[in-house]
Amino acid sequence: MEKFIQKYDDKINGVLNGFDRLVFRGSLRFLSYTAGMMSFLYGIGVLLKDFGEYAERTTKRLKESSLEAASRLDRTIKYLPSSKTKKLPLAKEIAKRDDITDGLICVLTCVEPCISFKVFRDRESKKLVLRPWPRKCLYIYHYWIDPLFGFMSARIQTWFPLTIHIWINGRECLAREMDRLHIEYKRRENCFIWIEDVDKAQKLMDKQLQVAWQQELDLIAHKLNPAHDRIFGENKANYYWTIHQSEWASDIMFKSSSALAEIYPALAQGAISFFSSPNVMRFLGRKPHGNFKGEVVSDYKKRPEGIRVKHSVKANS
């Protein structure tokens, strides 16, 4: 990367490095396995024969609490009959239609696959047992224009173990900050093609590494389920946050489209042709060895903005 930038320095306006798309996963770890869920039910005095009724009450309580803010603010609440409906464009369309520039945009709900729990009668012991089980339940999606993160979204699974996913975009967050500081820029989709002050923009981007993520994510979780503390009472039920997906991107801003066009064909060909499987594995932090059972995949797609080349090893790319 550094050699490339040095070689074409006279054609480049600036380079921006930082977070792109981030997906955080929030788990209530003590409810994420059977023994933990059993211990919780025992502690609150719920028998397995009553689990279904208790779970339904909890789901109803969560749903009413999650939708309360949207109802109070007269925001759109929409049930989607198909999980294949693209939610992001719909939320952006609602924001534009309702002229929403800050705060909650809408709440979308949809039935989707989940991992929850189910009570069975064990054939040998003749007793009821609780097991994790693939099921389908209602998910609640919230979309906001957040003061810090800009356009963002989050969802909560309304059945135990009440897992949360939060989508944040580092470029969106940067755009929000540059708007606040009156730094001019040109943006195409999720890429900056020109920034008035690249150095200042990079410093703003670097500040994202210092965000108090635990605190910010907990606040978002509370917006998703304001009834959380009432549901769990004296039981300590804090979310444990992990990064489910993360993208780190570099925007190389050329001075003109013609300057990029001169080298673009060779760049695209080189990206797909000259990286062997060992090269890809080393870059993604894996040591090549003869016993590796996985598959290294390289592919490209033509998009309106250009060619996307992707190298992947299993879920890492």
Image: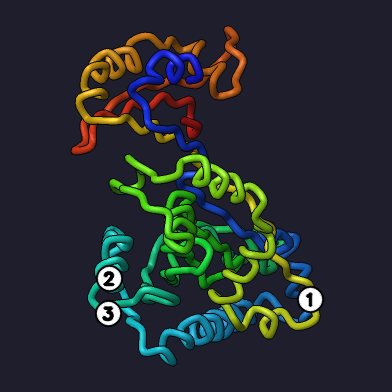
Q: Nearer the viewer, residue 114 or 205?
A: 205
Asked if the residues shown at circle 3 and circle 2 are in contact, with their CB atoms under 8 angstroms apart, the answer is no
Q: Nearer the viewer, mark 3 or mark 2?
A: 3
Q: Nearer the viewer, mark 3 or mark 1?
A: 3
- Residue appearing at x 61%, y 75% in the figure: 222
| Residue 74, percent from left and from top | 36, 89
Asked if the residues shown at circle 3 and circle 1 are in contact, with their CB atoms under 8 angstroms apart, the answer is no
Crowd tier of the residue under label 2, counting other residues whose Cα lies within 10 Å: few below 14, some 14–19, many 20 or above: few
Crowd tier of the residue under label 1, counting other residues whose Cα lies within 10 Å: few below 14, some 14–19, many 20 or above: few
Q: Give the vertical position of 112 relative to 53 (above or below).
A: above
When asked about the image quadrant of residue 172, the answer is bottom left
- Residue appearing at x 72%, y 62% in the figure: 125
- Residue appearing at x 26%, y 24% in the figure: 260
Q: Give the vertical position of 199 relative to 73 (above or below).
A: above
Q: Which mark is residue 129?
A: none
Q: Is residue 141 visible?
A: no
Circle 1 SS class:
loop
Circle 3 SS class:
loop
- Residue appearing at x 43%, y 77% in the figure: 104
Crowd tier of the residue under label 3, counting other residues whose Cα lies within 10 Å: few below 14, some 14–19, many 20 or above: few
Residue assigned mark 1: 235
| Residue 206, percent from left and from top | 59, 44
Residue assigned mark 2: 81
Upstream in the sequence, badge 2 or badge 1? 2
| Residue 94, percent from left and from top | 27, 73
Report the Cα–Cα distance between label 3 and label 1. 40 Å
Residue assigned mark 3: 98
